[in-house]
């Protein structure tokens, strides 16, 4: 029988535990863990060779890629599934209907597998857990909460709304970055072309006409830079790839990821957008989970793992430890010093009134608007900055090329 490694959360204490279990399938393993009071968040078949009856058996599970539904398609499917369930259709029939209607082959495969698993006796959440590349921990735990509360259509509707708002927020940030990225890229290409193809022609003219006379400092600097770029062009070509590689390697280290996330969170100009986006994501995720009935300790672990920022994840983990000791959420959040006082105050009011999900939703909506305003302000700020930078670069090249002309004209006259 296959052995599975798992990561789970104790439903009573909220403590995260790891271990292994023997079961026929992942769904059965998750069901067994649930009977033991464990809330499975990750289950994976052990890949090591197992000894059985004195013989070594090596299990090879070769797959050319996991079955994944694109995020945009998953958002539409979740909304459609919620609508079908609200209309009174059974779950299996709804899944089969979406499978037939979908034009995406991968979505058809995943929906077929989920429907088959439900038909064989698995719960909806257990069936979804067979496709971890598509359905993340947030999705699975929301569905589990819907199963426990008997309100699957309501939970799926909330989940679809959460995904739509998150996608809208990410789209705003990406669209704002397209314009300056295109302008900067074109400017770099034009400047590189001038330095490699135009400046050497002027350098040859200066050498012939001045006959060894010294060039102005700015002109000599341009010629030296142009010569270096022309002879070391492969450095320029490799620089972006090396930079991306170094960033990825740094992100894989514990302290490197924290350092880069800290820089992003507090850096000028872009920092406010990163911090406001992180706060909006934190508030919306936690509020959605709590509104769905997910226990607060489990919800905090999910928020930690889906925050996307190590700085926020560490703060959430400190909140988790404090809540486990019987404290509230607002005080440890204030102690982290990465959340604004307005957010702390609204969460404190939510704790006092017992309306935490509503307050978190209001915080998320407020910071969605803040991100929108910050993106618009950034776009307005970047335009004059780019104009000034381009003017300085082009002006330096023009001055450097025309500085020797006075000497040349005097010599010719």
Image: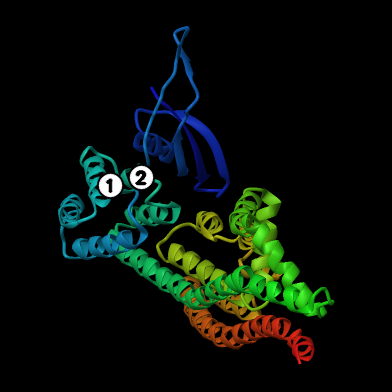
- Where is residue 69 drawn, in percent x and y? 32, 53
Side of 116 relative to 246 (left or right): left
Identify the residue at horizontal 50%, vertical 24% (top origin).
Answer: 48
- Mark number, residue 110: 1
Q: Which one is nearer the viewer's eye here, 123 or 381?
A: 381
- Asked if marks 2 and 1 touch (Cβ < 8 Å), the reply is yes
What is the crowding at mark 2: few (fewer than 14 residues within 10 Å), some, or many (at least 20)?
A: some
At label 1, counting other C-alpha atoms closer than 10 Å, the crowd grade (few under 14, some 14-19, many 20 or more) is many
Q: Which residue is mark 2?
A: 131
Label whose residue precedes the other's in the sequence (2 or 1):
1
- Regarding residue 151, the answer to whether it shows in the image is no
- The residue located at (54%, 58%) in the rendering is 300
Classify residue 38 as left or right of residue 338. left
Where is residue 404 shown, x and y percent of the image? 76, 84
Which image quadrant for residue 317? bottom right
The residue lying at 73 percent from left, 87 percent from top is 405
337 to the left or right of 145? right
């Amino acid at each position: 029988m296959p052995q599975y490694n798992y990561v789970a959360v104790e439903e009573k204490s909220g403590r995260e535990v790891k271990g292994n279990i023997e079961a026929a399938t992942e769904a059965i393993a998750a069901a067994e863990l649930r009977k033991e009071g464990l809330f499975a968040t990750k289950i994976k078949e052990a890949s090591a060779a197992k000894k059985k009856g004195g013989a070594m058996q090596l299990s090879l599970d070769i797959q050319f890629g996991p079955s994944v539904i694109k995020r945009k398609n998953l958002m539409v499917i979740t909304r459609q599934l919620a609508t079908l369930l609200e209309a009174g259709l059974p779950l299996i029939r709804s899944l089969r209907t979406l499978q037939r209607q979908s034009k995406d082959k991968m979505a058809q495969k995943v929906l077929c597998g989920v429907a088959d698993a439900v038909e064989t006796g698995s719960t909806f959440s257990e069936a979804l857990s067979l496709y971890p590349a598509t359905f993340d921990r947030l999705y699975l735990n929301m569905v589990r909460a819907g199963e426990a509360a008997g309100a699957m259509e309501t939970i799926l509707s909330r989940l679809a709304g959460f995904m739509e708002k998150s996608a809208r927020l990410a789209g705003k940030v990406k669209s704002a970055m397209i314009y300056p990225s295109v302008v900067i890229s074109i400017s770099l290409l034009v400047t590189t072309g001038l330095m490699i193809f135009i400046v050497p022609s002027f350098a040859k003219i200066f050498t012939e006409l001045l006959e060894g006379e010294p060039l102005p400092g700015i002109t000599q600097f341009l010629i030296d830079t142009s010569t270096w770029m022309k002879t070391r062009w492969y450095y320029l070509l490799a620089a972006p790839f090396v930079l991306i590689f170094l960033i990825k390697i740094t992100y894989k280290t514990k302290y490197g990821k924290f350092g880069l996330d800290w820089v992003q969170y507090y850096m000028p100009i872009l920092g406010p957008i990163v911090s406001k986006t992180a706060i909006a994501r934190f508030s919306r995720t936690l509020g959605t989970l709590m509104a769905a009935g997910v226990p607060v300790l489990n919800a905090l672990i999910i928020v930690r793992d889906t925050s996307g920022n190590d700085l926020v994840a560490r703060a959430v983990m400190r909140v988790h430890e404090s809540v486990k000791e019987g404290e509230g959420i607002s005080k440890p959040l204030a102690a982290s010093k990465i959340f604004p006082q307005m957010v702390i105050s609204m969460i404190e009011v939510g704790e006092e009134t017992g309306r935490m999900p509503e307050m978190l939703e209001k915080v998320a909506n407020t910071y969605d608007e803040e991100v929108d305003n910050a993106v618009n302000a950034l776009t307005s700020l970047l335009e004059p900055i780019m104009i000034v930078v381009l003017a300085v670069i082009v002006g330096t090249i023009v001055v450097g090329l025309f500085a020797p002309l006075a000497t040349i004209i005097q010599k010719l006259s």
